[in-house]
């Protein structure tokens, strides 16, 4: 890479780190890149067809393309990104710093930073957010409450 290429045009090289001898790299295909690499990475993937019953606590980045029946919480409130894929569903409370939703959440959401709701996103529950980006076709069935910093009601 050369320094004359704008940051948003550079590929995410962290996606090529080793995940085992036969692992394929996760390619980040979003148009927007943040300046914080912690918010761009995916450390764990729950694939389509995966069902989890119980609470999840994660750090870094988590993508859910399956189903989770329980609360999903980031261990460090400074940087933790949860992405709910098109077929992903969470039935429980979500507490993260950055949230990207393509699928469905049934429960309250607490995000200290940005909440990105894509066209097919569905949230049934109150959404506490620091900032929000909502695409046409996204649906929230609940209250939207803007909170600043730790005022979102969680540590």
Image (cartoon, rainbow, N blue to C red):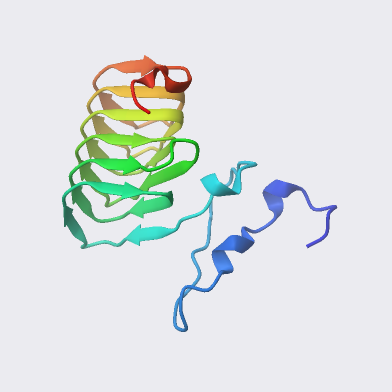
Residue reaching furthest to the bottom: 21
Q: Residue furthest right?
A: 4
Q: Is residue 92 above or below residue 44?
A: above
x 47%, y 83%: residue: 21
Residue 95 image offset from top left, x and y in percent: 33, 34
Answer left or right for 72 relative to 40.
left
Closer-to-camera residue (133/81): 81
Q: The C terminus appears in which quarter of the rendering? A: top left
Residue 129's x, y, as percent?
40, 24
Q: How many numbered discs?
A: 0
For the N terminus, the quadrant is bottom right
Q: Residue at x 21, y 63 (%)?
A: 49
Is residue 11 positioned above or below 116 on the image?
Answer: below
* Residue 124 position within the rendered picture, expressed as x and y whole percent measured from the top left: 21, 29
Identified at 23% across, 34% down, the residue is 93
Residue 142 locus on image (x, y percent): 24, 20
In-front residue for pair 130/118: 130
When asked about the image quadrant of residue 128, the answer is top left
| Residue at image coords 43%, 40% | 76
């Amino acid at each position: 890479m050369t320094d004359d290429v704008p940051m948003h045009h550079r590929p995410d090289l962290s996606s090529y780190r080793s995940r085992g001898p036969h692992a394929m790299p996760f390619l980040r295909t979003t148009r927007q890149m943040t300046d914080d690499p912690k918010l761009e990475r995916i450390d764990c993937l729950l694939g389509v067809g995966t069902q989890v019953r119980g609470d999840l606590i994660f750090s870094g980045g988590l993508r859910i393309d399956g189903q989770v029946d329980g609360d999903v919480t980031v261990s460090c409130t400074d940087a933790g990104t949860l992405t709910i894929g098109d077929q992903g569903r969470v039935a429980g409370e979500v507490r993260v710093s950055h949230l990207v939703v393509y699928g469905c959440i049934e429960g309250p959401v607490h995000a200290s930073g940005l909440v990105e709701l894509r066209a097919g996103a569905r949230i049934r529950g109150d959404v506490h957010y620091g900032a929000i980006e909502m695409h046409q076709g996204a649906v929230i069935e609940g209250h939207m409450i803007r909170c600043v910093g730790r005022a979102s009601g969680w540590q």
